[in-house]
Image: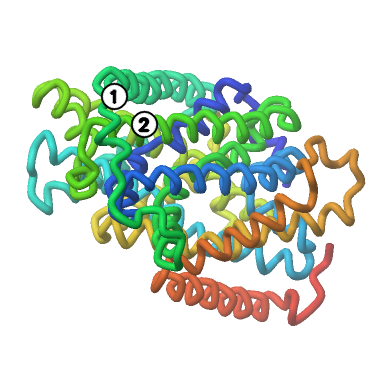
């Protein structure tokens, strides 16, 4: 089934950039700022934000080359299938992307909705069950807003983008005009002792910061709906990472220059605390409303991207065919969207935020990120240059460095690493059982 016959290429560069950046800048940075400070034990936490940006840029080279070469809905699903061969290992790895997406995508969506509900409690305390109701309600509103044509979604994304970056710029301006260097750059004793404890802390902090950068590849999942994808997909990825990385570093520095890091590391509402220090309680409440706007905008974008993965797999015959259905008039995969929102709704009622963040990282790294970095090397050997509109610089160095850094980050997830391995193992078992029933590879040669 041809994707181009089903989806509408209605996203230009500005809409793709807006969707990418609002996906990246969600509730994540405002939740993890205190965690990063606590992990690093002082203002040296800025290094973790820089390392996260470098890792995102290196891996962005992989996504840019693959996204430009295969501008289809599904992103990683398509890339792994083609890199490792659609008849053999590519079937397994692309299936594992879907397997993980069934759990990971709703987990990511749930993490955002839970974070939204927790930040909302600064304005009004509803108790534990009230927070769960808010989190579930956010998912329902998302489903309603995303149930429309891609052109309309692009316009909504531009509106959300204005609120997101307006809030961040306000935070930065407020921080610069009330900045105290004695607070921002007063390091505890031994802060820069480059021993194993320092690097262990940096690894743990980077697990948190890379969570806030994830989303730079969201445009790849929407590849079948992007205009001039060979040019616009790479531009969207790199521009998003650079702009957001600078904003994160400036934002973290501003927070450190207003709120003592000893206090900031224990704050549940760090941005609200930041504005309260400067302007008082009423302004802090208004700022909290804007943070909730940012959280919702990010959820809007990432839910849109994830809904295209099961759709792509269904078209391929590698997932339930019902997920390949496109709305007859609005031209978007409505079954896939509604299914993910339904699972995310349940997860938002069941899990805690800290567990969700580490579990997301552990599940994604090996198959999606390491698998793609190896895959782009394999494709370079098989595909001629004309099939690759964008070619990463200094190949294969970025791909090799990405593999090493992702493996190090996987180890840094700690006990959640075991969760990731178990999830992959379970997916392999399900794949083998399914393949045996269908008499496909490795039990019989699949037809190309």
Residue 108 seen: yes
Asked where in the image residue 121 lies, by quadrant, the reply is top left
Residue 103 seen: no
Residues 249 and 296: in front is: 249
Q: Is residue 154 above or below residue 84?
A: above
Crowding near the residue tagged with mark 2, few <14, some 14–19, many ≥20 C-alpha atoms within 10 Å? many
Residue visible at 31% across and 46% down in the picture: 187
- Along the horizontal axis of the image, is 69 left or right of 114? right
Residue visible at 41% across and 43% down in the picture: 46
Mark 1 lies on residue? 175
Asked where in the image residue 368 lies, by quadrant, the reply is bottom right
Mark 2 lies on residue? 251
Secondary structure at numbered mark 2: helix
Question: First in sequence: mark 2 or mark 1?
Answer: 1
Q: Is residue 313 above or below residue 13?
A: below
The image shows residue 237 at horizontal and vertical percentages of 61, 35
Q: Is residue 87 above or below residue 145?
A: below
Distance from Cα at disc 2 to Cα at disc 1: 8 Å
Residues 201 and 123: in front is: 201
- Along the horizontal axis of the image, is 21 left or right of 326? left
- Along the horizontal axis of the image, is 406 left or right of 261? right
Residue contact at pointers 2 and 1, CB within 8 angstroms: yes
The image shows residue 209 at horizontal and vertical percentages of 42, 48
The image shows residue 135 at horizontal and vertical percentages of 24, 45
Asked where in the image residue 287 lies, by quadrant, the reply is top left
């Amino acid at each position: 089934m041809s994707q181009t016959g089903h989806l509408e290429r209605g996203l230009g560069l500005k809409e793709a950039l807006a969707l990418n950046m609002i996906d990246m800048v969600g509730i994540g940075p405002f939740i993890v700022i205190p965690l990063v400070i606590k992990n690093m034990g002082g203002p040296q936490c800025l290094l973790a934000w820089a390392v996260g940006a470098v890792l995102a840029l290196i891996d962005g080279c992989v996504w840019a080359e693959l996204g430009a070469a295969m501008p289809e809905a599904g992103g990683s699903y398509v890339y792994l299938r083609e890199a490792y061969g659609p008849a053999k290992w590519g079937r397994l790895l692309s299936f594992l992307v879907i397997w993980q997406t069934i759990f990971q995508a709703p987990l990511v969506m749930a993490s955002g909705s839970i974070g939204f509900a927790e930040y909302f409690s600064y304005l009004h305390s509803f108790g534990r069950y009230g927070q769960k109701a808010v989190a579930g309600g956010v998912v329902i509103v998302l489903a309603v807003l995303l149930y429309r044509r891609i052109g309309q979604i692009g316009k909504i994304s531009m509106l959300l983008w204005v609120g997101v970056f307006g809030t961040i710029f306000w935070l930065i301006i407020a921080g610069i005009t009330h900045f105290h260097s004695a607070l921002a750059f007063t390091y505890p004793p031994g802060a820069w002792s480059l021993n194993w404890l320092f690097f262990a802390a940096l690894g743990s902090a980077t697990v948190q910061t890379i969570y806030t950068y994830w989303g730079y590849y969201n445009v790849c999942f929407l590849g079948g709906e992007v205009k001039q994808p060979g040019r616009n997909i790479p531009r969207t990825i790199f521009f998003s990472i650079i702009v957001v990385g600078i904003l994160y570093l400036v934002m973290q520095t501003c927070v450190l220059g207003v709120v003592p890091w000893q206090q900031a590391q224990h704050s549940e509402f760090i941005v609200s605390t930041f504005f309260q220090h400067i302007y008082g309680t009423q302004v802090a409440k208004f700022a909290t409303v804007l943070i909730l706007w940012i959280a919702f905008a990010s959820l809007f974008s990432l839910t849109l991207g994830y809904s295209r993965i099961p759709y792509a797999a269904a078209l391929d015959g590698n997932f339930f065919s019902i997920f390949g259905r496109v709305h007859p008039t609005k031209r978007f995969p409505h079954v896939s969207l509604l299914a993910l929102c339904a699972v995310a709704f349940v997860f938002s009622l069941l899990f805690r935020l800290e567990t969700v963040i580490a579990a997301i990282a552990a599940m994604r790294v090996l198959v999606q990120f390491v698998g793609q970095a190896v895959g782009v090397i394999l494709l370079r050997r098989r595909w001629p240059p004309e099939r690759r509109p964008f070619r990463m610089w200094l190949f294969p160095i970025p791909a090799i460095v990405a593999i090493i850094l992702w493996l190090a980050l996987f180890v840094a997830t700690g006990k959640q690493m075991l969760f990731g391995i178990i999830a992959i193992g379970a997916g392999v078992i399900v794949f083998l059982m399914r393949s045996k029933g269908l008499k496909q590879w490795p039990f019989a040669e699949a037809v190309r």
